[in-house]
Amino acid sequence: MTEKVKGPASYFPSIEAKYGQPIDHWLGLVAGKTDMKHMEIVNWLKAEHGLGHGHANAIVAHQLAKKG
């Protein structure tokens, strides 16, 4: 029995399907935004790449959580 993915990563399959890029592409973009706060990065993804708010927020939350 496999455990269901929870949290921000649960959005990853739909992000890949909707925007046509692997999740590593989006995480890499966010990783380069070290001078920006969470919502600044979310707004940047929405404005520059056309992501929806929930998808952008999931990517940013996942990437920032990895930085610990």
Image (cartoon, rainbow, N blue to C red):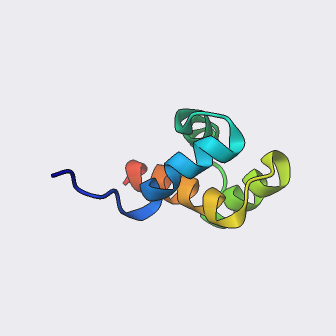
Point out the residue furthest to the right here. Answer: 47
Q: Is residue 14 left or right of residue 42?
A: left
Question: Which of the pair 54/39 is nearer the observer?
Answer: 54
Picture coordinates of residue 13 (x, y %)? 51, 47
For the residue pair 67 and 20, the one nearer the viewer reads as 20
Nearer to the camera, 47 or 37 = 47
Query: Would residue 19 be found to the left or right of residue 31 on screen?
Result: right
Outermost residue toward the left? Answer: 1
The image quarter in which residue 60 lies:
bottom right
Residue 12 image offset from top left, x and y in percent: 51, 49
Q: Is residue 54 above or below residue 34?
A: below
Residue farthest front in this picture? 1
Q: Image quadrant for the C terminus?
A: bottom left
Residue 51 point in image, percent of width and height: 74, 54
Which percent across, then down, holds residue 29?
Answer: 64, 38
Res 47 visible: yes
* Residue drawn at 29 percent across, 58 percent down: 4
Check the image and report above or below for 3 versus 22: below
